[in-house]
Amino acid sequence: MSDSILTEEDRKLLIRVNRLLEEVLEALEVMGDNGTVKAIREGEEDVKAGRVRSYDEFVEELRRSGEI
């Protein structure tokens, strides 16, 4: 007889629920920050309008400006 109250399946479920709750809390935190929400919306608008660049272009821009 096992000394554990929870089965392995129960433990796995609790871990999944914990991760989901952490994600929900993080989302609520982001949604509560007006500056972050505004930046996300602006970023989405930039993507829709095609105002984007590749990662390599971004890194090259940083190098030219001396930031890296």
Image (cartoon, rainbow, N blue to C red):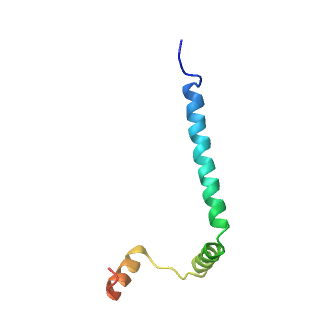
* Residue at left offset 54%, top offset 27%: 8
- Which quadrant of the view contains residue 17? top right
- The quarter of the picture where the N terminus appears is top right
**Residue that sits furthest to the front in the current view:** 3
**Residue that sits furthest to the bottom in the current view:** 65
Q: Position of residue 52 (x, y in %)?
A: 51, 79
* Residue at left offset 66%, top offset 60%: 28
- Which quadrant of the view contains residue 9? top right
Q: Is residue 1 left or right of residue 34?
A: left
- Which quadrant of the view contains residue 40? bottom right
Looking at the picture, tell me which residue is in the foreground, 28 or 46. Answer: 28
- The quarter of the picture where the C terminus appears is bottom left
Q: Position of residue 57 (x, y in %)?
A: 39, 80
Q: Is residue 15 left or right of residue 55?
A: right
Q: Position of residue 16 (x, y in %)?
A: 58, 41
* Residue at left offset 62%, top offset 76%: 35
> Relative to residue 59, is residue 22 depicted above or below?
above
Q: Position of residue 31 (x, y in %)?
A: 67, 66
Looking at the picture, tell me which residue is in the foreground, 19 or 60. Answer: 19
* Residue at left offset 59%, top offset 25%: 6
